[in-house]
Image: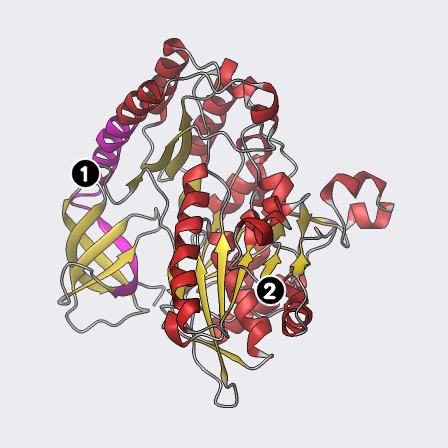
Amino acid sequence: MASENVIEEKKQGQALITENKSDNKKKLFIESYGCQMNLNDSEIVASILSNQGFNTTINLEDADLVLVNTCSIREKAELTIRKRLQKYNAVKKINPKMKVGVLGCMAERLKEKFLEEEKIVDLVVGPDAYRDLPNLLEEIDAGRDAVNVILSKDETYGDVSPVRLNSNGVSAFVSITRGCDNMCTFCVVPFTRGRERSREPKSIIKEIKDLVDKNYKEITLLGQNVDSYLWYGGGLKKDFKKASEIAQATAVDFAQLLILCATTFPKTRFRFSTSNPQDMDLSVLHAMANHKNICRYIHLPVQSGSTKILKAMNRQHTREEYMELIDNIVKIIPDIALSQDMITGFCGETEKDHQDTLSLMEYVKYDFGFMFAYSERPGTPAAKKMPDDIPLDVKKRRLAEIITKQQEHSFYRTKAFVGKTVEVLIEGVSKKSDLQFKGRNSQNTVVVFPKEHYKIGDFVNVKVEDCTTATLIGTAVGYSENN
């Protein structure tokens, strides 16, 4: 069984709620599935609809409008959404005035087909079209279909201040890029979220300042591929070479943005996700090494340890290049923690390819990871051109071996903290005991310890006394200098 930080399935939907405005009379129930970008998008949707008279609710039965923000990364994610819509349908029979909308990647992929396949659905809205929600709701009221899945060429929501949903008041997400240009053959993201474009640095800093003023202590910079961040005045990244010489000369890349954030807010901790090996520049690593408020953690998806499979996936790196990058990361940031995404059972994967993956894991010894059996996605190059030829039982066996290997490495990494003192940002109460706080260290490992006189939002030093594969267990020994 996968442990808490050896994750086979990413956490799925939860009802999202925020503070209510007294003048708002309509009720919005919104659930978000899939990646952190979807959660951040749901916060943007809540902000847009808050200005249209909607407060959020966690009671489905009370809702005037129900929205589900969807994921298309795997077939299982889409099946989960279909089952959830059945629940909405049962409630809608009792409350026929309730409207149901599908947002996100699954909406973008299926478009008008959703209205045909799921009769309960009233509106379908892609990731770049949330500003159009007020107009789409008017279309529904007028008895017309409401669909908008047009992809944008610019950062779509840079001036929208997200409503923080289910917030712990301590950590928050800030989106810096949208879309992806990498065209991995297994992935639907370029087709559901469009081409890469970056957000203006000033708007990013403004949003972070608002969060810092509200006493948030940790910010995660988000994007499908944050390493590709490049602001040169707006537009798609692929068009950068066509920009004026002035725009090229004054462009801001990801390393520069990281430094800007770290120096502008020296008391705020920064994380980022997700990285792509082919785009990670050494300047990013040096920025991390030179600023202690940039966390010592990188999520660096590899997908496979076999160069042959990486080529079939259209990953723009080889096994050897990835290992060289790992060597540079560890050399520049010795106390770094690394996590992975891994797909097993991709088209044409042999037992040797699988062993290459296991040996790569042995080389890196990731702190934790997200591991999946390959799931063919309609419309992707792999689905069009490559047979899904690995039997399910083989996929399951290989996945189990990868998970076992990751559990061993996770325990190896957590044991290394025992006896050491780590800085922890308190994020909330432990799930297992209301007498303990939980938080994360710079390496993104969960730490639990007795509450004593500390409070949520404090930076404290914790002496680590024990561990599991997922969690460090210790005692706070005082406030950190960052508090």
Q: Nearer the viewer, residue 354 or 290?
A: 354
Residue 399 at x, y percent in the picture = 32, 26
* Rendered position, 79 above or below 351: below
Question: Which image quarter holds the N terminus?
Answer: top left
In the shown orientation, is residue 360 left or right of residue 476? right
**Res. 101 image quadrant:** bottom right
Q: Residues within 10 Å of mark 1 (few under 14, many from 20)?
A: some
User: Could you give the CA–CA distance between mark 1 and mark 2, rounded to whole angstroms?
Assistant: 37 Å
- The question of residue 22 being in magenta is answered with no
In the shown orientation, is residue 305 left or right of residue 208? left
Amino acid on which the number 1 mark rests in the picture: Lys
Q: Residue 205's mark? A: 2
Circles 1 and 2, Cβ within 8 Å, touching? The answer is no
The numbered mark, 1 or 2, whose residue comes first in the sequence reads 2
Q: Which residues are magenta?
A: 403-428
Residue 281 at x, y percent in the picture = 58, 36
Amino acid on which the number 2 mark rests in the picture: Ile
Residue 205 at x, y percent in the picture = 60, 64
* Rendered position, 55 above or below 267: below
Q: How many marks?
A: 2
Q: Nearer the viewer, residue 148 or 128?
A: 148
- The question of residue 412 being in magenta is answered with yes
Q: Provide the secondary structure element on which disc 2 rests.
A: helix
Residue 392 at x, y percent in the picture = 35, 22
Residue position for label 1: 415
